[in-house]
Amino acid sequence: MTDGFETLSADQFAALSVGHASAVERLRSPGRFEVETAFVYPGKGSVVVQITSDGQAVRFSDGGGLLLYLESQGMDLSMDPVISKTVFHALKETPGSSAASGQIYLDSTPDQVGVDLWRFLQIVVEIIGMRHSKYKDALVQLARAGDAHPMDWDRPPE
């Protein structure tokens, strides 16, 4: 995993995900943690969540994995304005979330980690799922184009 981050076990992740008192208390002190989740970037490996706390505020981040994954799927936000707007709209719809320095993140507090960890994972999974909509949209556009201009493969194009 990443240098400078303490790796959380599955039990520690479970405690954090329900806002267990011991997990919340741990975030009331500065620390940097990461955990491998059961969610995956299809064909690319597990979604890893990085958690940083200064004792007052907690930030959940993808460590840059989500945007790299999208790029590997031909969905580069810097090159595709539709994808870019869709991602940033999804982030805007979730209070506390944003993107900076190539990472998607959600800001929280120690008392809200049980809820906000799941909100963060929901954002990540929704954005991962965009790859399906991009392909579906391309197929719909091809079908519409085919309906509008039936092709006779034995004739040269007009």
Image: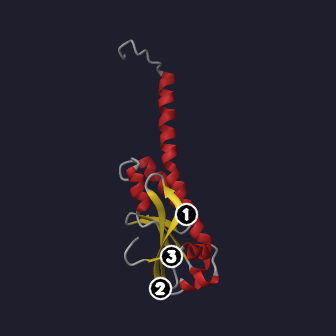
Q: Position of residue 47 (x, y in %)?
A: 48, 62
Which residue corresponds to mark 1? 121
Residue 92 in view: no
**Residue shown at 39%/47% (left/top)?**
74
The mark lying in front, picked from 2 and 3, is: 3
Q: Quadrant of the N terminus?
A: bottom left
Classify mark 3: helix, strand or loop: loop
- For the residues labelled 1 and 3, say whether their Cβ atoms are less than 8 Å apart: no
Q: Quadrant of the C terminus?
A: top left
Q: Position of residue 70 (x, y in %)?
A: 42, 53
Per the model, the C-alpha gap separating discs 2 and 3 is 15 Å
Marks counted in the figure total 3
Which residue corresponds to mark 2? 30
Given the image, on which type of amino acid does mark 3 rest?
A: Leu
**Viewer-side residue, 140 vs 128:** 128
Per the model, the C-alpha gap separating discs 1 and 3 is 16 Å
Scheme of image coloration: secondary structure
Q: Residues within 10 Å of mark 1 (few under 14, many from 20)?
A: many
Classify mark 2: helix, strand or loop: strand
Picture quadrant where residue 5 is located: bottom left
Given the image, on which type of amino acid does mark 1 rest?
A: Leu
Question: In terms of sequence position, does the residue under pointer 2 or pointer 3 come before the other?
Answer: 3
